[in-house]
Image: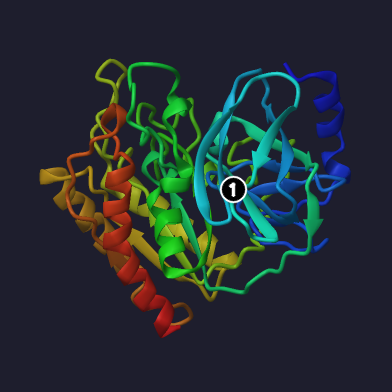
Amino acid sequence: MFLKKIALLISFLLLSIVSTAQTQNSSKTFLYQGRIDKLQNENVILIGTASSVSFNFTGNECSISLQSVDSYEHHNYVSLVLDGKYLGKIKIEKGAAQSFPIKVTSNKKEHRLDIYKNTEAQSGNILFAGTTAKLTSISFKKKKKIEFIGDSITCGAASDSVDCDKGEYHDHHNGYYAYGPILSREIDVNYLVSSVSGIGMYRNWNDENKDEAIMPDVYQNLYLTKDKSKPKYDFAFEPDIISIALGTNDFSGGDGKKERLPFNPEKYISNYINFIKMLYEHNPNAQIVITNSPMVGGDRGVVFEDCLNKVKAAFDTDKTHKTIQIFKFKPMTPKGCLGHPDVADQKVMADQYAPFLKKLLNEK
């Protein structure tokens, strides 16, 4: 359960300034990116995969205050990048806010710290409750923008493949090194990750959309849930490209124990078309790219590609929006935990996809 302090803080959400998926620079001391909820006093809830807060500071050290926030107490993770150098991920234990020391090793007069949520929205939220740093101004560099919509692969779930048999599912996440963030850094664009492990377009990994929500059910909720007490997503990010990678779980056979119906291409295609129409309502100028999965091959892969072609064809007479593009990842034998791509595999995917997206951006 929440501590009283956090319960009180969350109760003020309706009074807070909600800053969703849009890089902000209101105070000129903090930059926010990704699915985040900006509270009072520069406190912010990091929600989605690789959502972040960044700031510049002077001096040789500072500390940051972070807290794992969820409907029940459990730990979480962030990744730290100092002066462009990846420091690794740190564990935020359950309970009260904790202070984490940051020590500088470079001789620069001014330093930059980036704090990235390492886990996904379904792993709970992380409260950034401030810093002791001597802050200096930080500027927002306008860049092209890409949104990555997907499942566990897009989350970077199970990609930290050390000791896969130990810990919990989210212990092996590394959203900073998921293919979307990797390629975005490579081609120098701002990005937003809207992804949920196990989720699909019309059904999930082990659920026929009976007990669990699918992506069309949760996408328009800021927290990627069906919780109506949470703010709605405001579509303020306005991406130049929207990349959709959903289908791995729709094609999954589940756990082999729970009832699993044969794949229904009509439902998948219909839901996909309606999902794109919803995205167009809010992002009429976006270039949409739909992808296959490196983990769906053989006969299923052929059906998958046929479905994507039919989704694309449904918009052939649409003269209002840019022509939908299809990108095909090469087949992969993943080396991460639970049959997922590991960090090296994610880099392979990023290297495949980056030139394609960069070319599209250059055409805009």
Where is residue 255 drawn, in percent x and y? 28, 21
Q: As displayed, is residue 44 above or below residue 31?
A: above
Q: As displayed, is residue 113 above or below residue 218?
A: below
Residue at (78, 42) in percent of width and height: 131
Residue at (23, 60) in percent of width and height: 328
Name the residue nearer the viewer: 331 or 167: 167
Residue at (32, 30) in percent of width and height: 161
Lateral position of residue 152 relative to residue 213, left or right: left
Lateral position of residue 234 relative to residue 253, left or right: right
Question: The residue tagged with tag 1: helix, strand or loop?
Answer: loop
Residue at (44, 42) in percent of width and height: 155
Quadrant of residue 339 in the image? top left
Residue lying at the far front of the rendered structure: 107
Q: From this viewpoint, is residue 122 visible?
A: yes
Q: Amino acid at mark 1?
A: Thr
Where is residue 175 drawn, in percent x and y? 47, 43
Quadrant of residue 290 in the image? bottom left
Q: Which residue is mark 1?
A: 105
Image quadrant occupied by the N terminus? top right
Image quadrant occupied by the C terminus? bottom left
Where is residue 344 drawn, in percent x and y? 29, 45
Q: From this viewpoint, is residue 119 visible?
A: no
